[in-house]
Image (tube, grey):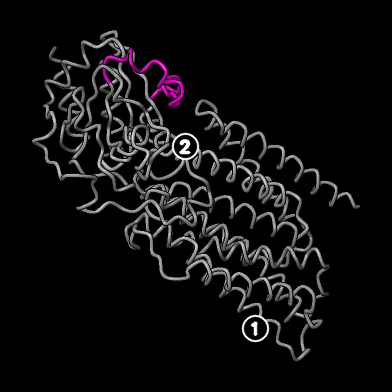
Amino acid sequence: MGTNELIIQLAYLLSAILFILGLKRLSSPATARRGNMLAAIAMLLAIVVTLLDESILTFEWIIAGMIIGGLIGATMARLVKMTEMPQMVAVFNGFGGLASGLVGAAEFLRFQIGGAPAPSLDAAIAIMAGTLIGAVTFSGSLIAFGKLQGIVTEQPVTYPMQQVVNGLIFVAILAAMTLLVVAPASGPGSGVAPELVYYGLWAGALVLGILLVIPIGGADMPVVVSLLNSYSGLAASAAGFALNNNVLIISGALVGASGLILTRIMCKAMNRSLANVIFGAFGQAPDSDASSGEKRTKADVNSVGAEDVAMLLAYATRVVIVPGYGLAVAQAQHKLRELADQLEARGVQVRYAIHPVAGRMPGHMNVLLAEANVPYTQLYEIEDVNPDIQAVDACLVVGANDTVNPAARDDPASVIAGMPIVEVDRAKHCVVLKRSLSPGFAGVDNELFYARNSMMYFGDAADSIAKIVEEVKQL
């Protein structure tokens, strides 16, 4: 090993260590920003060192890609709203998978058409695995993006013998991969045209990615986004084996493993197995008739105004705030922080209860509240809030629905039965800020709205909270 190669490998090792340290710090909101910075430094180091590799043929395309990619990233960072973050994460997952798949394609075609030496058996397997996982991740992520954006229906799309069709496609893909690994026909001029088989592999994998995601409904999109993130990491790791690049193998494995762990956490938070999420066609988007039992109206609830809510919160001792997707839609996180500041100035203890699947992607609420500079020490998981929630004077639910629905605890027949919830109905009082009585993503009515200790304040969350803040100031 020459001096240059030794420097490259040591730099890759340092980059891998920084990735691990960065990932560790991402586990806590208090250190997440530093963790993200460490990971960014690790990626920059890996890119710079890779450019020192003598096998790089030309820098023109690399520089052009960095400029174009940087401009696109900067534009998206400025223009994409917080409510659209789940869609952007889905797109990132998709393009990460596509990049890994294209690396596999380049390596395959370099041998098959370009006349390069045939890859080793393990490299050939890695190329095929990267192609399959990358293509599935890309097309599946585009469907997930479409469902989140409203371009594709959030309702599960099912048809007869769906799993059989998926199974046949997967068997055909495995057959193509086996043929290309075991009998690649040694390269150009063999007469077998293995490149056509490879193109067919791509087409089959892209179709499979679509078919795997379209049966999954809107309520399950956080799990799907997390799973696709794991897929993108596995695809990157496979690309690392194809290129014999250690830092790519390690970083991809870290993303893949962390994504799977997060997916398991999300499934546990919904009291469902991963197989049930993928094959159960649950998570139907709500429609106008999606309610259990007799249709109820605003006349059936205790509707209140800003003055009533302000009186309740201002003279409380302990308040728990439960944010949901409605908070993101209304962009009300800054107003919510202002309300919390006003309450704390009056001696009220304020805590935030964060449900793992609140919002439309993992960590959605944490990101929103961090943007409003909510102290990390005020963020609590549901198992830290529920045990003493009966002593809480008031719970303020801002745009949450399924994650506070008592049916998950009390109704064994409910589609969300067994899902852990924030048990706000057991607090002394509960105020729900919501536009209407419409159900959540699970499509079931929420008994919380009609409970004796619950009050509904209808309207846009940002406007409602602003009015509450003004009323609190006048007390």
Residue 260: x and y in percent read 59, 45
Image: magenta residue range: 374-394
Q: On the image, numbered disc 2 is attached to which residue?
A: 269
Q: Type of residue at label 1?
A: Leu
Residue at point 29%, 44% (across, down): 440
Q: Is residue 42 above or below residue 384?
A: below
Quadrant location of residue 264?
Answer: top right
Residue at point 58%, 50% (across, down): 230
Pick the residue in front: 167 or 20: 167
Label number found at residue 303: none
The answer to whether 132 appears left or right of 307 in the picture is right
Q: On the image, numbered disc 1 is attached to which residue?
A: 196
Quadrant location of residue 400?
Answer: top left
Residue 16: x and y in percent read 71, 42
Q: Which is more N-terminal, label 1 or label 2?
A: 1
The answer to whether 230 appears left or right of 288 in the picture is right
